[in-house]
Amino acid sequence: MKRRRVFLVEDEPIIASGIERKILQLGYEVAGSASTGEAAIKAVDADTPDLVLMDIKLEGRLDGIEAAAEIKKRHDVPVIFLTAYADEATLDRATQQDPFGYIVKPFTDRELFGAIEVSLHRHELDRELREREERYRMLSEVLSDFAFSVRMARDPEHDELEWTIGSLEEVIGIQLDGVRSIEDMLYVVHPEDVAGVRAFWTGLRNKRGGRIEFRVIRDGARTDWVKMDAKVCGAEDGFDRLYGALQNITALRTTEKRLEQREFEFSQIVQTMRQVIWVGDAENVCIYANQALCDMTRYSREEIVGKNSLAMLVGTRSPAPGADGGSEPYEVQLCRKDGEEITVLITPRRIEDDGGEIRGSFNLVVDVTRQRHSMDLLSRSKRKLEGVFHASPTASLLIDAATNAVLDVNEAFMALTGFDRDTIVGSGGFGLADYEDLDDLNRMVTLLKERLSRSTEIRLRTKDGSSRLFGVEVREIVVDDEELLLLILSGE
C-alpha cells in the first residue's frame, strides 16, 4: 500500500526535526518541509502532498493561516494546524479556513496519528461528495431544465439552497431570487395540484426520494406540466442534502396525449373492421387482436392476446416477422376453437423501428372460403364484366362486399400500381391502404363500409413499396344476386 505523504511547515528547526521523526515512525512519508509560508506554497505547488501540517506562528510575510488559505485556493489538500498557544482573534481566523484539524504542541504520537488519519479520511469523504455532486450537476444540466441542492435543517423553515443549475423562470415562470422555500413556489402551481406538491415535499424527509408531475399556471393563463425528481442523501456534516431536478414536460405530455388519441382512433378502426387483424411483437407474441379475429376463430381475446396465438391457430406454417418471405401473403389452414378447419389467406406486414430492427408484424386475415365462392361467381359472370371492367382504361379492382377480399384487378390498375394480378387477388382490400397513416386507413375503411358516393383521396402502397395519393370512388354492382364493390382509381 502506498504510504501517505505529509508536508511539514515549522520554523523551529529542532521541533521540525522531532515532528519529522514522528511522521516516519507512524508509517508516513515526509514529502518535504518549509520554515516560511512563502516557501511552503512554492513547495506544495511543485509537488502536492497528501496532507500539510502547518504551524500557525511563522516568521516572514505570511503566517500559517494565510499560507493555508493560499494553498487551499490552489490545491485540494487537507491542512492540520499546529499551535502552542494563540489568542482568540487568531483562532477565529484559523477557523474561517475550515481546517481539517488542530494539534496543540507538545503532542504524543497517538495524537498526531489520530489527527492525520481523521483528516485524511474526512478529506476522502469530502472529495467523494464533491465528485458525486459534480456528476449530479453534469447529469442535471443535460437531463433537466433546472437542478438544485438543498441543505436540509431539522426545521424545514431553515433549509438552505446551496446551488442551482438552469433557469427556474423558464420552467415555472418565477424568478429564483424570490424563492426561499417550497411555499414560495406554490402560488404558481395549479390549485388542484397544490396539496399534492406540498405533501410530496414534506414526505421527502421520510421517503428519501421520489417523483411527482404537476401543473403550473404561466402568465396567468397558460398551463404547463412540470416533473420534479428528488433524492435525499446524508452528509458528513450531519445535515441531509436534497438533490432535485425540475423539467417542463408539457411537450411530452402533449405528444403522449396525441399518441393516446391516435391509438384510440386506431383501436376504433380495427375493432369495427370486418377484416380480421392479428398484431404480434418480434417474438410472435400477440399484442392485439380485433373482434373479427375472435369471431372467426371462436376464441376470446383473452385466449389470443399475450401468447404465440398465431402458431396456435395455424401451426408452425406461419413465418416469423423477420424471416425470408415474412412479408409475403400465404395461404394456410386455420383451426378454430371447436376443431373446425378453414382456409385463410394471411397478408403480413413487418413493423420496423427507425433503425430497421424488426418490432413485430401486422397481419390481415381473409377467410378464403368466402373468397373462393366469390371467385367462382366472378368466373361464371366473367363475360358480363369484361366490357365494363377488364377492357376499361380506368384503373379498377373488384372487391367482395362481405369480406373485403380483392377478387380481380384490370390491366390499367396493374400498370398504375405496378402490382400483378396474382399478388393482389385474394388479399384484403384494406391492405392496399397505407395503414401506417391512420387517416388513410380510416378513409379506406369508411369507403368500403359506407360505400361513399363521392370520390375521395387515399394514399395507397405501390409495388415498389412507396406510397402514392390516388383519387378513389366506389360503385356497388350486383352479380348473380351477390354484391360486389368496384373501386375506380385515378392518379398521375
Image (spheres, rainbow, N blue to C red):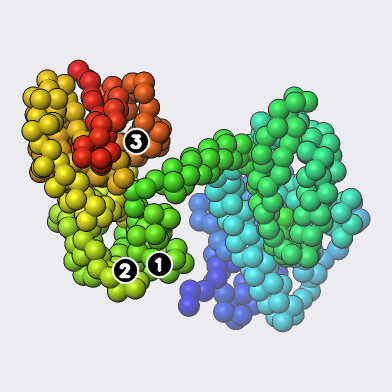
Q: Secondary structure at mark 1?
A: loop
Where residue 110 sits, quadrant-wise, is: bottom right
Label 2 vs 1, first from the N-terminus:
1
Instruction: Name the amino acid, label 2.
Output: Arg
* Residue 350 visible within the image: no
The C terminus, quarter of image:
top left
Residue indicated by mark 1: 299
Q: CA distance from mark 1 to mark 3?
A: 26 Å
Q: Residue 214: image x %, image y %? A: 71, 44
Quadrant location of residue 231? bottom right
Dot label at residue 336:
2
Discs 2, 1 touching: Cβ within 8 Å:
yes
* Label 3 SS: helix
Q: Position of residue 63 (x, y in %)?
A: 74, 50
Q: Residue at x 28, y 22 (%)?
A: 471
Q: Residues within 10 Å of mark 3 (few under 14, many from 20)?
A: many
- The residue indicated by pointer 3 is 448
Marked residue nearer the N-terminal end (1 or 3): 1
Lateral position of residue 474 relative to residue 135, left or right? left
Amino acid type indicated by mark 1: Tyr
